[in-house]
Structure formats: structure tokens, C-alpha cells
């Protein structure tokens, strides 16, 4: 999970109301069930000590939900009588509410599914149409087009002495198109902010473009059997392939992070080759080690083990994201005059967001996950 969208939550002091609510409407009495859920949320917030103004802001937002296109779940975070973030969820959460000094964002690691942004190219023999596919919208990005030439079309190939010249012109035209499309994709890639490139169209044209892409882009490129540049062509089958590509990308990201974490366990310098650290020390495990790494902004990827006992343990925090400590005395030693209690997972996610680090939930069935549920892959080792 990328953490940039959480930063507005950490720019304000608490306490915070954090609400996770199932908004699915799959039963005949869905409207009644929704009202009961909303009442349960209000009751939980009041019981936990939330102020009346913030409770009212949350309930007003839930009451004005648009039934059309309702997602299966929502997460709301409110403070000071204002809903600061209202987030649609791809899966239905258990309905519950919290009142705490930090927003309780840890459940999002399993509920907010990151869908990698895809740059999609519909390629044919004359060029390509480009689109940017994000989670909830698709945006046209223009075209890459070569100039028309007289030989284009579906007429039969001549069988006379000019046949070789004709074939050569066709081949040159395809190569020119591939050069133009690949160059445009290379130019667009940095500004698009995409994680995946999807090439759709005829296999010959796709392959020619892919072979001309720079290696960093080619490494995150997939080819789709479906998808056409023709006007009115259906995109439903292409959408299925994009979903599969996104799921594979997310799975590989998790596997890569867990592999780097597994390799990096241990003390710095235990494995060195030609003076270069080649393994242990590049990861932190357990609350004290991960908290220390978070204070120094060393964390590249924060790993939260599913149902790990340490994720909900108490830590001490100050106003700044890097002010997090296992002991209250440690927080005071950092200059925090009045340390506040917080959950370890929420405090570490706040620190991860400030350092532009990612957060990944490690399912319980993944081998070699962090003991106790807290781990991190580090950017560097002190």
C-alpha cells in the first residue's frame, strides 16, 4: 500500500474518529441494515468518548451516501468536527469505530487494495492510441501515429517483379511504427506515473514495440491478447487481463519484499563480500528494531503480519511522525514533553507515510513473515 494518500491525516492533531463500515446492499432489507450499522457506529464513538461535533460530522456524511454505485465498504477519518478523508473500499470491512489519538489506519493495509496505474497502448500497423487506467477512471493520453503511405490497406500483394519492393516497404512501415510508438511510450512514461505498461493489439505489432522499449519499462510490460484500436471495439476482455496483470504485480511486490526481508534478517555486516554488505542487517524485526528504524527514516517497506500480536501493542508518540518510542522515557528523551499512547501499527504507518515508504500486509500463510507481526525492509543500515 502506498501511503501518500494518508498524509493529510497526519498533518492535524488528534484525537480522531476512525470508522470502517460495510456499505454493501445485497439483501432486500439493505436500507434497514445500513441504518443499524450507522447507529452502531454512532454508539461506539460515543462510548469511546468522541465529541458530539465530530460524531455529527461522521453521521451526516454517512446519511448523505449516494446509493448509486456504492462501494462495498468505506473508511472515514474525522477530527475537529470535520471528515478529513472518506475512502471507498474494494472489500467489505467489519463495521466498527474507534476514537484514538492517531487515526486507526492499520486496517487499510488489508482493505485498501492498491491497483497499479496502467498505461495502455492499443497498437496497429499505423500507430497507437494511449490511455491511462487508474483505479476508478480511464483517461485518453493521445496518439502515436506515423504518416500514411500509399501501400497501406488490404489489397493483395502483387505477384510481379515489384513484390519484393512492396514487402520491404511493408516491413519498413511496421518498423517505423514500432519506433514511433516505443519512443512516445518512453516519453510519456515518467509523467504518467504508471507502474504497468499494457500493450494491446496484433501480436506482431506488440512484439515489435516491446523489443524497442528501454529495459526498465520492458520489465513492467505485459502483452494483452485482447484489445483493439478499432472504433467501438469492446474492452471487457481487456479489462479482465488488466485485472490479472494488476493482481500478479501486487503478488510479486509482496513476494519480493518478503524475500528481501528474509535475506536481510540479522546483524549488519554478518555477510560481506569485497567490503559490501550482501545480506543480514538490511531488515528490522520486532517492535524495538522497527521503531528505531522508523525514527531514522530508514524504512523502505513496512511489513505488518496478519494478526501479529505486536501490531496492536502500545507505543509512545509525539507530534512529529519520527517521534515514536517503545518506552515513555525514550519519548521524553527525544524532547516530547507530553508523550501520548498509540498503537504500534498506526504510529509506524504514520512514520512510513512521512518517509514515503510503502506498507504491506503479510498474510498468515506466508512463510518467514516478521515474528510478532512487525518488520521492515531498510533503505540503508547504520
Image (cartoon, rainbow, N blue to C red):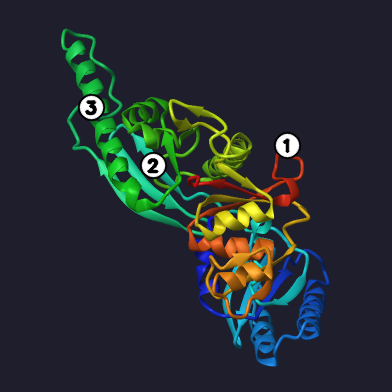
Nearer to us of marks 3 and 1 is 1
Q: Which mark is residue 121?
A: 2
Report whether 333 appears left or right of 120.
right
| The N terminus: image quadrant | bottom right
Q: Element at badge 1?
A: loop
How much space separates mark 3 and mark 2, taking CA atoms? 18 Å
Residue 71, x across and y down, in percent: 65, 64
Q: Establish if 250 lies above or below 17.
A: above
The answer to whether one can see residue 1 in this image is no
Q: Establish if 244 lies above or below 77.
A: above
Residue 85, x across and y down, in percent: 57, 74
- Residue marked by disc 3: 173
- Residue marked by disc 1: 367
Of the two numbered discs 2 and 1 on the same chain, state the one appearing first in sequence: 2
Report whether 274 appears left or right of 327.
left
Residue 244, x across and y down, in percent: 59, 40
Nearer to us of marks 3 and 2 is 2
Amino acid at each position: 500500500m502506498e501511503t501518500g494518500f494518508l498524509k493529510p491525516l497526519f498533518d492535524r492533531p488528534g484525537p480522531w474518529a476512525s470508522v470502517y463500515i460495510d456499505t454493501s446492499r445485497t439483501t432486500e432489507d439493505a436500507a434497514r441494515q445500513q441504518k443499524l450499522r450507522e447507529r452502531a457506529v454512532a454508539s461506539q464513538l460515543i462510548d469511546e468518548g468522541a465529541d458530539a461535533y465530530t460524531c455529527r460530522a461522521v453521521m451526516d456524511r454517512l446519511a448523505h451516501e449516494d446509493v448509486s454505485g456504492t462501494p462495498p465498504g468505506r473508511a472515514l477519518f474525522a477530527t475537529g468536527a470535520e471528515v478529513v478523508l472518506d475512502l471507498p473500499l474494494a472489500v467489505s470491512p467489519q463495521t466498527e469505530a474507534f476514537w484514538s489519538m492517531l487515526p486507526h489506519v492499520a486496517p487499510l493495509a488489508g482493505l485498501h487494495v492498491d491497483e497499479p496505474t496502467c498505461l495502455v497502448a492499443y497498437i496497429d500497423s499505423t500507430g497507437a492510441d494511449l490511455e491511462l487506467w487508474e483505479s476508478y477512471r480511464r483517461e485518453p493520453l493521445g496518439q502515436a501515429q506515423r504518416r500514411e503511405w500509399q501501400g497501406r490497406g488490404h489489397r493483395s500483394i502483387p505477384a510481379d517483379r515489384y513484390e519484393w519492393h512492396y514487402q520491404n516497404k511493408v516491413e519498413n512501415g511496421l518498423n517505423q511504427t514500432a519506433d514511433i510508438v516505443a519512443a512516445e511510450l518512453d516519453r510519456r512514461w515518467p509523467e504518467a506515473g504508471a507502474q504497468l505498461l499494457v500493450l494491446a493489439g496484433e501480436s506482431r505489432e506488440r512484439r515489435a514495440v516491446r523489443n524497442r522499449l528501454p529495459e526498465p519499462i520492458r520489465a513492467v510490460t505485459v502483452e494483452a491478447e485482447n484489445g483493439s484500436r478499432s472504433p467501438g471495439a469492446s474492452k471487457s476482455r481487456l479489462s479482465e487481463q488488466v485485472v490479472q496483470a494488476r493482481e500478479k504485480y501486487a503478488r510479486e511486490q509482496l513476494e519480493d519484499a518478503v524475500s528481501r526481508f528474509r535475506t536481510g534478517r540479522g546483524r549488519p555486516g554478518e555477510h560481506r563480500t569485497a567490503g559490501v554488505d550482501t545480506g543480514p542487517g538490511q531488515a528490522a524485526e520486532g517492535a524495538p528494531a522497527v521503531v528505531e528504524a522508523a525514527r531514522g527514516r530508514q524504512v523502505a517497506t513496512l511489513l505488518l503480519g496478519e494478526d501479529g500480536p505486536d501490531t496492536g501493542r502500545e507505543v509512545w508518540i509525539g507530534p512529529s511522525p519520527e517521534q515514536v518510542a517503545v518506552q515513555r522515557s525514550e519519548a521524553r528523551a527525544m524532547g516530547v514533553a507530553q508523550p501520548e499512547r498509540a498503537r504500534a501499527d498506526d504510529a509506524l504507518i504514520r512514520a512510513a507515510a512521512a518517509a514515503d515508504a510503502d506498507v504491506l500486509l503479510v498474510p498468515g500463510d506466508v512463510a518467514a513473515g516478521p515474528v510478532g507481526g512487525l518488520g521492515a525492509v531498510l533503505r540503508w543500515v547504520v
